[in-house]
Amino acid sequence: MYDWSDEHRAIIDVMRRFVDEEIRPHLDDLEHNGMPPYDIIRKMYQVFGLKEMAKENFARALERKRNGEAPARTSSRGGDPAAQLITTIELCRVSLGLVTSMGVSTGLAAGTINKLGTPAQMERWGLDLVTMDKVGAWAITEPDSGSDALGGMRTTAKRDGDGYVLNGQKTWITNGPYADTIVLYAKLDEGDGTDIRDRKVLTFVLDKGMDGLVQSKPMRKMGQHGSPTGEVFLTDVFVGKDRLLGETEDTPGGGRQSAKDNFVQERVGMAAMALGVIDECLKLSIDYAKNRMLWGKPIGDFQLIQQKLAHMEIHRINVRNMVFTHIERSMNGAPTSFAEASAVKLYAAQAACQVADDAIQIFGGNGYVAEYRVEQLARDARVLRIYAGTDEMQTVAIAKDLLRS
């Protein structure tokens, strides 16, 4: 695949109209007035028939689970992987935060439930998440673990009769303040003195309002204001075995492997998010370079501005090719390795940040104020080098894979 098909270009045109009509008018509220993004996402699901598509895909996944078949290698929303990534790219041209909230709810939270859960658990929680009828959160990160998410995890699950008692704290949880359903990872505490780093990781599903479960108010962040982020506190939260995904402590692919698989999908998907930022920054910068006059001529006539635009275009081509490669692999059922996903995420995140920074430089003082949009895009892009694994952790993953070969 080297370019979008005519059908894909038609989707791009429709998505851009939706963005212009339904999202841009609300940008100030999303960015500065604390407006949650969920009604906008639901409107998009309604306009483009995504809700019905999600239901159909869910029904197929449920049938496969009941028949004991392996899950299909598709998104929780189903359909053409290219069309799905187009949605991500076009939304990220205007609000990365909105995409982050949607992806965590319908991808990480719903995807984990529908992959690891029993058919009953899928019906109980999964369907409402893939349709955006309810909001989901995926809680793995903790204040003292950061990049060591699994090894450094301190949240515990202790057996208690037919269930478990959960204690701990999660932080930087996307959708945490508003989530109806929380997929939460915890270390099994068997009371046998096993080092906490070596304990089994279990995955539970919690509902808003459970006794002992507290969801914080949204954090104040540098960027991605369109994606509410918060903390989750657990104090003696009792959960029955029906809330343990798979209803067994030995679910195939559960716990640690589940988290790792999710990191692969999340990291590869960030190339599409980065491409949206790069596309928009380059478009805005080209327009500005053509129309901003200095010493009697457009600033685009100056070689240093041309150099920045050229490097921005190089990054755009490289990240676009990464996205196209991922689409082809997805269509052919070819898995992406952990190291490959890390390489894609590392380059795309750094490219988006560099392009956004160059856009601000081209705009000069205007780039530093909110009205010119590149300021928001730069703030939003910066977290791409942190969440789903920092640049440093991507580098480690790539190097370890190379040294094993």
Image: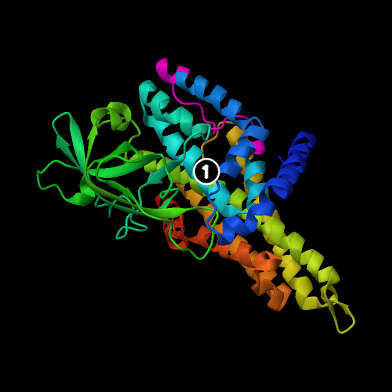
Label 1 environment density (alpha carbons within 10 Å; few <14, some 14–19, many ≥20): many
Please check the rendered image and state whether residue 162 is part of the magenta-colored stretch, yes or no: no
Q: Amino acid at mark 1?
A: Gly
Q: Answer with left or right where residue 293 lies relative to residue 334.
A: right
The answer to whether residue 340 is seen in the rendering is: no
Residue found 60% across the figure and 57% down from its top: 29
Q: Nearer the viewer, residue 38 or 161?
A: 38
Quarter of the rendering containing residue 54: top right
- Residue 43 place in picture, x, y as percent: 62, 38
Residue found 77% across the figure and 34% down from its top: 7
- Hey, which residue is sitting farthest right in the picture? 296
Please provide the residue range marked out in magenta: 63-83
Q: Secondary structure at mark 1?
A: helix
Please check the rendered image and state whether residue 65 is part of the magenta-colored stretch, yes or no: yes
Residue found 37% across the figure and 47% down from its top: 139
When the figure is inspected, residue 376 is found, relative to residue 58, above or below; the finding is: below
- Residue 350 place in picture, x, y as percent: 57, 62
Q: Which residue is mark 1?
A: 103
Q: Nearer the viewer, residue 93 or 64?
A: 93
